[in-house]
Image (tube, rainbow, N blue to C red):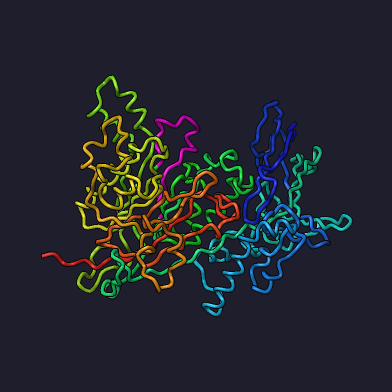
Amino acid sequence: MLTVLRVHLPSDIPIVGCELTPYVLLRRPDKSVSTDDVNEFLPVDGHFLRYKWYRIQSDKKVAICSVHPSEQATLQCTGCVKAKIPVGKSYHCSSKCFSDAWQHHRVLHERAASAVNENGNEEEELFGRFNSTGSSGLAGSQSNSSLSNGTTPLYPAAVAQRNGGETWFEVGYAKTYTPTADDIGHVLKFECVVVDAETKLPAGHVNTILTSRVIPAPSPTPRRLISVSGVDVTGHLDLDGRLSSSGTFTVLSYNILADVYASTELYSYCPSWALSWPYRRQNLLREIVGYRADIVCLQEVQSDHFEEFFAPELDKHGYQALFKRKTAEVFSGNGNTIDGCATFFRRDRFSHVKKYEVEFNKAAQSLIDALVPNAQRRSALSRLVKDNVALIVVLEAKFSNQGVDNPGKRQLVCVANTHVNIHQDLKDVKIWQVHTLLKGLEKIAASADIPMLVCGDFNSVPGSAPHALLALGKVDPLHPELAVDPLGILRPANKLLHQLPLVSAYSSFARIGAGLGFEQQKRRMDPGTNEPLFTNCTRDFIGTLDYIFYSADSLTVESLLELLDEDSLRKDTALPSPEWSSDHIALLAEFRCKPRTRRG
């Protein structure tokens, strides 16, 4: 007979909008052990599994701490109430909790006051829009009467029973349940029992699990889209260009932190529930969809997560998906967990023209065959073959970017998405990978008059040789990172150059003059490099690794997603966190194509 051996949940803390799928271990009649589901339509030996979810609603109202969501709140910040800050952010579990969080918490008060003082009301903030139920399609701050966690709509729920000061509501009839806003502050109960397929009666004891109290999905500090319109690469107003062209588009670049790398050992400061993939994937999706970018470049996307989650979910929001998985010469684990680069674009804004896949391993093999003697090839391959890739996509705009002089002419855009090797002791490999990518893009540029965008995680800080190559078009032969070149792949140093007129999009913040209201963003920039102070923020490292470069002869930056500062993060200033589900932050830029000058 079918027997349930064990039932447990992958996460102790249920979160609104994040699926709960219990782990159910079964012993089948043939004595084999399995976690496969056995439903009513495919019974095993005349038996199947029946599931039920209950919300245990206490007559006593409970508030949850905004800092420690697994704890019950004991005090409320009255300043938040007066400032009309979302009530969930006003609760704390102890006076020490409130005191420790004050540095971060007072920023909420300051931002609320600033928004009212400057605008007379709350500003519409780009990232804030994804918290509304209408934009993302996910369970948000209100219950959804059409949501189904089983075969029938959930609400109004039927009262199952009362026990003392508690009421049990049946809320789900499937193995998986997605908590809603109505569940916040309440304990959930999961029941699993073997049922006789003929009589429909239980044929064994009922296995149950009680969860912790359901918590709302943490909402990050909203990030605004800040206009830098009219600022060209020299920092001057470019009114003529703005007036003679029309149509803009937005590009997002984001390393989302693959689940295979998100270990509790590496990110011990992040609560385990916030580090779990079921939570992070929903939080990441809410964030990505909320930005409403026309083109989305993601790095560290696992193959299985691309196929099973990101591609189908973003398809619902109008995106077409392209993916390039890392090569597997070095990786020796499960092939489904190999990550790669994923590029998405809105079908109503762009159409796909061509795709190029760059496998640095293939380029490495060709280089070594040409340069390295046979006796040294094994060690050379060990150093240079690192599985990194790039995905290059040529898109055609479906909106007008041209002035009156070029009516009806096709507007193409070339978008490169890459993730460069991470190892800090292989600086020669990083430089070589970036140079290889740029030489490939030069060939595309030579064959067509096409704007270029180069996005990704380059694992290179501002001022490094790869950054210099991207931003300046060349590397100083005396750059210290060129000193380590055991394979001779960087010699002569004067070959490390390219002709693409690339500029870092976020350097527009640094070029803005005083008095234009951008002082806060300029304080989040490094004045020595004109790049953000950080795009990657962990306990062990804080610095900039991610960039969006664009060809300044054909594109101008209209606006940028505001940068985060340490006050915008939790008091420990480390990512990932319950609010932000990657150790990187997203970069987003809005571009306008410059009108083309007619040749001849």
Point out the image quarter for the C terminus. Answer: bottom left
Q: Is residue 522 left or right of residue 39?
A: left
Side of 541 where 168 appears, left or right? right
- Going by the image, does 466 lie left or right of 319? left
Q: Which residues are magenta?
A: 325-344
Tell me what residue is drawn at x 39 percent, y 66 percent: 559
Residue shown at 71%/54% (left/top)? 214
Q: For residue 577: magenta?
A: no
Report if residue 6 is visible in the image. Answer: yes
Residue shown at 49% from the left, 37% from the top = 336
The percent coordinates of residue 268 (x first, y second) are 61, 42
Which residue is pictured at 76% across the width and 53% down the height? 187
Q: Residue furthest right?
A: 164
Of 222 and 600, nearer the camera is 222
Does residue 281 appear anywhere in the picture?
A: no
Q: Is residue 345 left or right of residue 369?
A: right
Relative to 217, say whether 84 is above or below. below
**Which x, y percent locates residue 1?**
75, 31
Q: Quadrant of residue 477?
A: top left
Residue sitting nearer the eye, 599 or 87 = 87
How many labels were placed on the picture?
Answer: 0
The residue sitting at the top extreme is 375
Residue 22 x %, y %: 68, 43
42 or 160: which is nearer to us?
160
Name the quadrant containing residue 383: top left
The single residue placed furthest to the bottom in the displayed view is 120
Q: Give coordinates of residue 223: x percent, y percent.
A: 50, 63
